[in-house]
């Protein structure tokens, strides 16, 4: 099973600033990686898949990069609605696995 | 618009059984793989099971293999998860999720979730 490790566990950023979240796989997952956003009491929302493709309706301030075992989610200018927990997920190997999450909080 | 509505959650004793359902609308249900993903209270996401668009194949996490069975009724646009021999570790919100469609597995639409509590 591929282990996904996200860092940091918590990231404190001021509104309007840039946030960079990291995800590392225990082995290469090629570009088969997704990012999800989850707010309290809500289901996750798909942001990015294929490492860098934005899902339908996702604002351009969200971008994904990386391949192999190292990936990054960047939020270019944080809005109030962006403070949430973010998960990465690999789909290169069964079982699909998620990272433990990064909580993005207001500084 | 795409909608997924789970039902069937509740409180069950260890060793008991529960059957979850997921009613889908707003897309051609029979064309997409569908999945169950769960989230224990205060914890992260865990994939549980998947079923191919035509029901030809299903896949399970090791943690539920042999105890859970995923099934679908394409004529009713409905997904099910039969859960047997439940343990306290199965306590979680269970989400059904639609696949993006393609060669890889990503979850583009999710239901609101149904809470399963296993407790004596």
Image (cartoon, grey):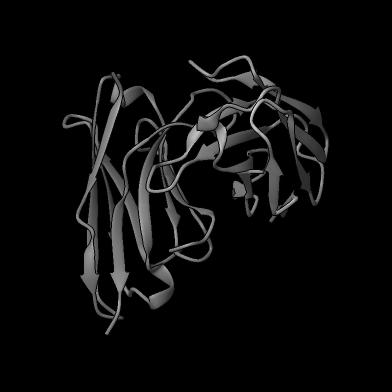
Residue at horizontal 63%, vertical 38%?
A91
Give above or below for A25 relative to B115: above
In percent of width and height, residue B112 lies at 31, 42
In percent of width and height, residue B44 lies at 54, 56
Residue at horizontal 45%, vertical 56%?
B39
Q: Is residue B83 visible?
A: no
B120 vs A88, left or right, is left
- Quadrant location of the C terminus of chain A? top right
Give above or below for B107 relative to B13: above
Q: Is residue A49 visible?
A: yes
Residue B35: quadrant of the picture? top left
Residue B120: quadrant of the picture? bottom left
Task: Name the one closer to the observer, A52 or B103.
Answer: A52
Residue at horizontal 30%, vertical 81%?
B14
Residue A20: quadrant of the picture? top right
In percent of width and height, residue A96 lies at 59, 46
Task: Name the one closer to the observer, A19 or B103.
Answer: A19
Labels in figure, total: 0
Task: Name the one closer to the observer, A50 or A85.
Answer: A85
Residue at horizontal 63%, vertical 28%?
A78
Give above or below for B46 relative to A82: below
Residue at the left extreme, as displayed: B76
In percent of width and height, residue B28 lies at 29, 19
- Quadrant location of the N terminus of chain A? bottom right
Residue at the bottom extreme, as displayed: B120
């Amino acid at each position: 099973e591929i282990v996904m490790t996200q860092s940091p566990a918590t990231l404190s950023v001021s509104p309007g600033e840039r946030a960079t979240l990291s995800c590392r796989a225990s082995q290469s997952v090629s570009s088969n990686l997704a990012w999800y956003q989850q707010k309290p009491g809500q289901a996750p929302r798909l942001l990015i898949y294929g490492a860098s493709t934005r899902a339908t309706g996702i604002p351009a301030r969200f971008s994904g990069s990386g391949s192999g075992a190292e990936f990054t989610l960047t939020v270019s200018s944080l809005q109030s609605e962006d403070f949430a927990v973010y998960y990465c997920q690999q789909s290169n190997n069964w079982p699909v696995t998620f990272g433990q999450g990064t909580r993005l909080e207001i500084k | 618009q795409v909608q997924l509505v789970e039902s069937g959650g509740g409180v069950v004793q260890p060793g008991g059984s529960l059957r979850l359902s997921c009613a889908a609308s707003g897309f051609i249900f029979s064309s997409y793989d569908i999945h169950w993903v769960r989230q224990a209270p205060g914890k992260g996401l865990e994939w549980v099971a998947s079923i191919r668009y035509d029901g030809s194949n299903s896949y399970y996490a090791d943690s539920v293999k042999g105890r859970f069975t995923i099934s679908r009724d394409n004529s009713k646009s409905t997904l099910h998860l039969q859960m047997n021999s439940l343990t306290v570790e199965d306590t979680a919100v269970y989400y059904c999720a639609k696949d993006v469609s393609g060669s890889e597995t990503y979850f583009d639409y999710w239901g609101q979730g149904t809470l399963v509590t296993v407790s004596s």
